[in-house]
Image (cartoon, rainbow, N blue to C red):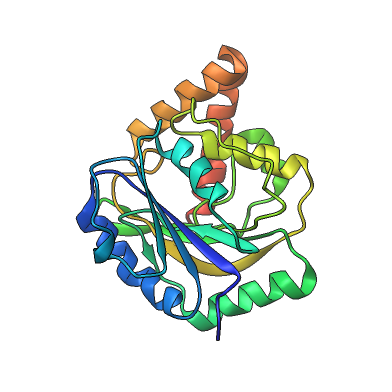
Amino acid sequence: MKFNDLTIITITFNNEKELLYTMSYINPFIDLGAKSVIINGGNKLKKNIFHNNCTLIQEKDRGIFDALNKGMTYVKTKFFMKVHSGDKLIINEFKLSQILNKMKSDNFDLAIGNQLIPFKGFKRKHSSYFWRPLLLNFGVQPPHMPTIYDKNFVSNLKYDYKNTVIADFFFFKDLFANKPKWFDSKEYLIEMGPGGNTTSGFGSILLVSKELIKNYGILKGIFISAARLPFKILQAIK
C-alpha cells in the first residue's frame, strides 16, 4: 500500500505541541510514501523534530488562508488534502487507499468526506451525506477539511485570505463553478482540534454572518446566514 500520489498540507502558528500531535497521525502515511508540507507562520521550529520527508516552510503569512495558498504551491503530487495543526487524521491506510484508487481509476477531481468536531465535551458530526452543490446558494459548503483534491483541477484557484472565516466557502463556490467530477467517500477522515473559528458555537455564527454581509450586502447576507443554519443541523445528524 503506497501513498506516493498524496501530499498532506498542515498549517501551524505557534503551537508546536499540537503540531507534533498531528504529525504523529500523519507520519504513518509518510512512511508509506505520502509527502508532507508544513507551513509555519509563527516562531521557528526545529526541522529535525519532523519526519525526514517533510517540507517545512517557515515565513510570515497573512493568516490561515494565505498559508493554504502557499501550501498548495508546494504540492507536486496528483492529490492533496489538509490536516491542520491540532487536528487528527483518523482514517486508516486501507480506506484512504481505496478513496485514492477510486479517484485515479474513475478520474474524479474531488472526494468529499466527513469530520468530527469537539463541542462542549462531545464530538459533533459534520457530514457530507445531505450535501449537494445546490446548497452553495444557501451558504453551505461540504466539510472542507476531509476533502481530497486533484491538484491539477484546483491549480488556478486561491483562497481569498481577506475573508478570515468563510474563505473556504468561496473557494468551494469557485471550485464547483468549474463543474468538478466528485463523489462522497462516506468516510470520516478528520477529527478537528478545539478552537476553530467556524466551529465554536454562537460566536462562530456571528463571525460567519458578518463576513457574509460584507460580501453580499445586508439583505442577502442575512438571508444566507439564516438559510444555512437548518442545513448545518442536517450535516450534524448523519
Q: On the picture, is 23 further left or further right than 99? A: left
Query: Residue 168 at what x, y percent from top left?
Result: 54, 40
Pick out the residue farthest to the bottom: 1
Q: How many marks?
A: 0
Query: Residue 102 at what x, y percent from top left?
Result: 70, 74
Residue 165 lies, with reference to residue 95, above or below; the image says above
For the point 63% across and 72% down, the residue is 100
Query: Residue 235 at what x, y percent from top left?
Result: 53, 52
Residue nearest the observer in this picture, 169 or 38: 38
Residue 40 lies, with reference to residue 109, above or below; the image says above
Residue nearest the observer in this picture, 92 or 55: 55
Q: Quadrant of the N terminus?
A: bottom right
Q: On the picture, is 200 further left or further right than 161? A: left
Query: Residue 18 at what x, y percent from top left?
Result: 25, 56
For the point 70% across and 69% down, the residue is 103
Pick out the residue farthest to the top: 218
Residue 140 lies, with reference to residue 102, above or below; the image says above
Q: On the picture, is 174 further left or further right than 124? A: right
Question: Is residue 155 something one can see in this rendering?
Answer: yes
